[in-house]
Every structure is written in C-alpha cells, then in structure tokens.
Image (cartoon, grey):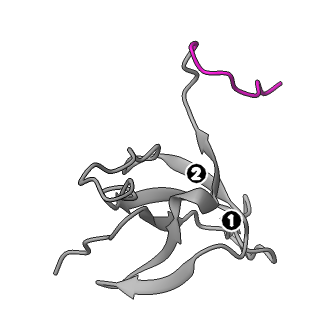
Amino acid sequence: MTLKLLSNLVAIERCDPNKLSTGGILLPNQKRPDKGTVVAVGPGKPIGDAPARSPMAVKPGHTVYFSSYSGIPVEHQGQELLLMPETEILAIESEGDPDEKTMASD
C-alpha cells in the first residue's frame, strides 16, 4: 500500500536520537529529535481556483529541521513517520550550493 499525501503535506522519518558509546552502550537521548529525512511530499498547495499548485521546496531525500513538537506521528508499513505541512519545516540541510544564502558552519 502506498502513501499518497495531499496538498502541501510532507512525510518525514525522524533521525535516530539514540547513540552508541565507544563501548557499545546505548545512550538514550532525552529530547525529541528535530531533524529528519523527507520520505514523501504532496503535490503542493492549490493556488486559488486555478488547477496550478505552488511548487514544493522539499523533495524526498532532503534532510530537514523542524520544531520538536511539529507534525502528527503515524505508522505506515512498520515505519514511524511524521506528517506535517511544508510550512512547519524550518530549514533544509544542503551540501553547499554556492548560489544559496546559507549559514556557514565553523
């Protein structure tokens, strides 16, 4: 069964917040992860009465940042996903496109 998103909805798989120590001990993270990978996107929000839709800025495979409590958690085919409108995504992690204005990391 496939998941078909409507309007400007985005399906995101959260990054795993738990980390292994060098000794192999699982260190649980106490805060909810605010980073994930886009799994699926809707066709875009309709523009007025026209059949045209606004283009989506995110695409499947993008790594994105969002508020810790954004989205609605759902389970689809054993995979835990968050469904949220594209407007709740705060930033897209990129590989350094020189034409984009981004915050450089030190």
Between 87 and 54, the one nearer to me in the picture: 54
In the picture, measured across the screen, residue 88 lies left or right of residue 8, that is right
Question: Residue 66: which quarter of the image?
Answer: bottom right
Q: Range of the magenta residues? A: 98-106
Outermost residue on the front side: it is 49
In the picture, measured across the screen, residue 13 lies left or right of residue 99, that is left
The residue drawn where x is 76% and y is 24% is 104
The residue drawn where x is 33% and y is 70% is 6
Q: Is residue 69 above or below residue 96?
A: below
Q: Position of residue 14 (x, y in %)?
A: 55, 67
Mark 1, Cα crowd under 10 Å, few <14 / some 14-19 / many 20+, is few
Q: Position of residue 102 (x, y in %)?
A: 70, 26
- Per the image, is 59 magenta? no
Outermost residue on the left side: it is 1
Question: Residue 93: which quarter of the image?
Answer: top right
Q: Is residue 25 above or below residue 90?
A: below
The residue drawn where x is 53% and y is 48% is 63
Q: Quadrant of the C terminus?
A: top right
Q: Amino acid at mark 2?
A: Val
- Per the image, is 99 magenta? yes
The residue drawn where x is 23% and y is 54% is 51
Mark 2, Cα crowd under 10 Å, few <14 / some 14-19 / many 20+, is many
Q: Main secondary structure of the magenta part?
A: loop
User: Tag 2, which secondary structure?
Assistant: strand
Q: Which residue is mark 2?
A: 64
Circle number at residue 19 = 1
Residues under numbered marks 1 and 2 in contact, where contact means CB atoms less than 8 Å apart: no
Q: CA distance from mark 1 to mark 2?
A: 20 Å
